[in-house]
Image: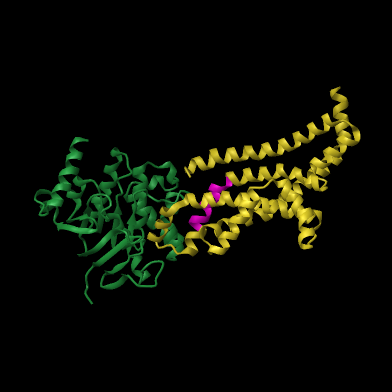
Chain colours: A yellow, B green
């Protein structure tokens, strides 16, 4: 195998790969856009909600944390239509699955952050005469977000990588494109290595941001 | 209506009906008094201050402040027993673990409540805050975050934050217990300054030397009761109750050894 021919082979398929990456980013970002707020709301319900709502939220989180994403994708794609007659179509069922999975894992991160703020900060708010309309947006929320950001960003990376599974339900994401090209050209080494490097490059960049944030920002505040 | 400054009547609080932290506490306080509350751990000292701040739900009893009904035990009230929230604004409290807001600067910590809860203009609140910080020798730390301060500085900022709200009485709950020994003096020094300015205070502390120095009156609590209530000169040299004498013997002995 020769490096120059390998690179020119990859270059020929660049469009297909980038289209795949575009789809991967599309699914991931929609999953994040729905999943992150969902996770935050679920964490609040689990901490101080109505007992029935709390039970529903906990069941949801445990099911999605405790089953493989691949099974979840298949379930929404194959079982939901068969059981309830609701056919979401493959795009919607994929996004739904990713959003629900993201909601479940990020609700745990938010919950931990909310818990870590603790009763003493709340006592201080009362002693300073801060009503909830002040203490929540100016004291509780900023600290929750700051503390949750590192784990939430790690969750984003997890979702980005797990999204490769959507190729199994026929979504033309980066993984799917890579596999297709590999199969049709019988040259899996170049193409799968390139695919892996693209995933790695993006995931690694985000992980670096997390490290930088933790070291510069959180350490400075000693949060 | 009595015109007593602070009046605590028959205050009772238990956890789960089993542990009686406050078991019928009664006392009155005049303005400018400095009451130091001492006693073994679990005797209800901190809980007493927390009740006066309105942080705890009480089972029975009432608290009046400046002749006004403030806190009363009421059946069917789940959250707190506050009768009059406006009264609470006259009370300031400082905690053992500083409880500064870590995401705000020193100045941000001070002006949050005046601006957001009391509607003071940012300019006026900032000016008052800077004056106060200057008085405490902390003006050069105004833009620092709490995480960058020493424990003593943090606690002085916490005191400044409470003072900026112009409280009529300050409650200090073991404010030097979390400090390194060499930092205790700067915080106690600030409290002594407040004493000179005739601030009314209630102080829970384990530091008997400081208690002796700052108190106009000492209350010894045990098992949720007030066992003895006397001026510091009396209680430290000639306690009336054997339990007080026993307690003082233990803590002062430990203090001289360590």
Choose top left, top right, bottom left or bottom right for residue A8.
top right
The span picked out in magenta is A138-149
- Tell me which residue sits at (25%, 73%) in the image: B67
Of residues A71 and B154, the one nearer the viewer is: A71
**On screen, residue A209 above or below B195:** above
Relative placement, left or right, of A112 versus A119 is right
Residue sitting at the far top: A2
**On screen, residue A10 above or below B201:** above
- Magenta residues, dominant SS class: helix
Of residues A34 and B245, the one nearer the viewer is: B245
- Tell me which residue sits at (43%, 46%) in the image: B146
Relative placement, left or right, of B226 versus B116 is left
Q: Position of residue A73 (x, y in %)?
A: 75, 50
Residue sitting at the far bottom: B1
Quadrant the N terminus of chain A occupies: top right
- Tell me which residue sits at (88%, 26%) in the image: A5
Choose top left, top right, bottom left or bottom right for residue A122.
bottom left
Q: Position of residue B81 (x, y in %)?
A: 36, 69
């Amino acid at each position: 195998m020769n490096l120059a021919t390998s690179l020119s082979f990859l270059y020929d398929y660049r469009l297909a790969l980038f289209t795949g990456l575009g789809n991967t980013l599309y699914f991931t970002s929609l999953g994040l856009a729905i999943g992150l707020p969902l996770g935050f709301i679920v964490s609040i319900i689990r901490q101080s909600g109505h007992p029935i709502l709390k039970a529903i939220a906990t069941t949801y989180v445990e099911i999605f944390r405790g089953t493989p994403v691949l099974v979840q994708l298949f379930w929404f794609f194959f079982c939901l239509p068969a059981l309830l007659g609701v056919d979401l179509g493959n795009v919607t069922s994929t996004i739904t699955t990713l959003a629900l999975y993201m909601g479940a894992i990020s609700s745990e991160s938010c919950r931990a952050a909310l818990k870590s703020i603790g009763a003493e900060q709340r006592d201080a708010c009362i002693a300073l005469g801060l009503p909830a309309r002040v203490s929540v947006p100016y004291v509780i929320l900023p600290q929750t977000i700051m503390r949750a950001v590192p784990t939430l960003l790690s969750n984003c990376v997890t979702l980005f990588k797990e999204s490769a599974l959507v190729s199994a339900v026929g979504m033309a994401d980066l993984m799917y494109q890579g596999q297709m090209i590999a199969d049709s050209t019988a040259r899996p080494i170049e193409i799968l290595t390139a695919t892996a490097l693209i995933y790695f490059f993006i995931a690694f960049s985000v992980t670096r941001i997390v490290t930088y944030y933790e070291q510069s920002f959180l350490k400075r505040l000693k949060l | 209506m009595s015109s007593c400054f602070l009046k605590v009547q028959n205050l009772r609080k238990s956890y789960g009906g089993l542990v009686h932290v406050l078991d019928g506490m009664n006392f009155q306080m005049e303005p400018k008094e400095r009451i130091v509350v001492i006693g073994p751990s679990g005797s209800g000292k901190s809980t007493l201050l927390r009740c006066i701040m309105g942080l705890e739900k009480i089972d029975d009893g009432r608290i009046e402040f400046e002749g006004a009904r403030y806190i009363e035990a009421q059946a069917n009230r789940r959250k707190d027993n506050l009768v009059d929230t406006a009264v609470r604004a006259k009370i300031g409290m400082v905690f053992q673990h500083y409880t500064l807001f870590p995401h705000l600067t020193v100045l941000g910590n001070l002006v949050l409540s005046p601006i957001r809860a009391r509607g003071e203009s940012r300019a006026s609140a900032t000016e008052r805050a800077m004056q106060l910080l200057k008085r405490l020798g902390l003006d050069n730390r105004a833009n620092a975050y709490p995480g960058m301060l020493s424990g003593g500085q943090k606690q002085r900022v916490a005191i400044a934050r409470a003072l900026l709200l112009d409280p009529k009485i300050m409650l200090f709950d073991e404010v030097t217990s979390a400090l390194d020994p060499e930092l205790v003096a700067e915080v106690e020094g600030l409290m002594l300054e407040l004493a000179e300015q005739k601030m009314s205070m209630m102080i829970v502390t384990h530091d008997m030397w400081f208690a002796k120095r700052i108190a106009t009156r000492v209350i010894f609590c045990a098992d949720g009761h007030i066992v003895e209530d006397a001026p510091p000169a009396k209680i430290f040299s000639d306690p009336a109750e054997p339990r007080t004498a026993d307690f003082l013997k233990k803590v002062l002995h430990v203090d001289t050894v360590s």
